[in-house]
Image (spheres, rainbow, N blue to C red):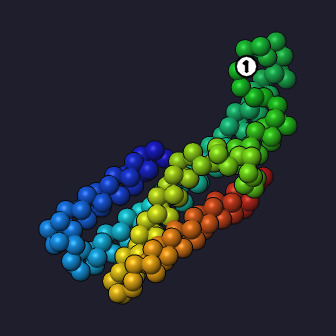
Amino acid sequence: MFARTTIFVAVLTGTVVALALLADATHFGPQTLAFALVLMSVTFLIGVATFVRSVAINWEDARWVTGMNRLRRAYLLIVPEVEPFFVTGHDSEADRQSLALALGHGSPQRLANLANSLTTTSSVVAALNSMLAGALASDLGAILGLALAPIVGLGTGVSLVSAALHVRFAGRFRRKRAP
């Protein structure tokens, strides 16, 4: 997952640098806005693909942790004396509770775990995607000749809608794959 995210961040960085150089060379003329629309669209597409895959990888990780906990539980049933040597979970009920806290297996987003979910790789990619979507909308507004206030409002609105759609996608992904 980190390699995918690194590629996305590298593409995003390259896009920003290319746009800065282009804006300097063209004195931020209309060519800059048109070229920005193309570059940011491609970058946004890469970001969405990265987000979708990172959500899937997070879910797969939760499944693997559950499987490992079940194996540890089986070892305990066979040889109960090994329990002091386990440093991680081995209880089925604890599995369900820890996965619910970690947003795995269909659990809904809760305010209590919001801080944890904002620090995940998929959430960082979602935030970058949302800002990129807002920048795309603002760029389009500038190309269409809108005034500054509507451009800012459009960009902000699209960013917020994009963030909500990212959260909704991740939640639906988890719910569809609940055990």
Q: Image point 68% across, 37% down: which residue?
A: 65
Classify 10 Å Cα crowding around label 1: few (below 14), some (14-19), many (20 and above): few
Given residues 153 and 84, the one toward you in this image is 153
Residue 167 visible (yes or no): yes
Q: Residue 139 appears in which quarter of the rendering?
A: bottom left
Rendered residue at 51%/57% (across/down):
127
Quadrant assignment, res 14: bottom left
Relative to the observer, which residue lies in front, 99 or 74?
A: 99
- Of residue 116 and residue 175, the one placed in the foreground of this image is 116
Q: Name the residue under label 1.
A: 86
The image position of residue 31, as x and y in percent, is: 22, 78
Q: In this view, does 134 lie to the left or right of 41?
A: right
Q: Is residue 168 above or below residue 73?
A: below
Instruction: Work out whether 91 lies above or below 83.
Output: below
Name the spot of residue 164 as percent of width and height, x first: 62, 66
Q: How many marks?
A: 1
The amino acid at mark 1 is: Phe
Residue 52 percent location from the top left of the image: 54, 60
> At which x and y percent is residue 19?
25, 65
Q: In the figure, 147 relative to 175: above or below? A: below
Q: Is mark 1 on a helix, strand or loop?
A: loop
Give the residue displayed 49% in from the left and 47% down from the top: 1
**124 left or right, relative to 45:** right
Q: Residue at x 72, y 39 (%)?
A: 66
Q: Which image quadrant is residue 165 in?
A: bottom right
Q: Can residue 45 be seen in this view?
A: no
Q: Is residue 68 left or right of residue 26?
A: right
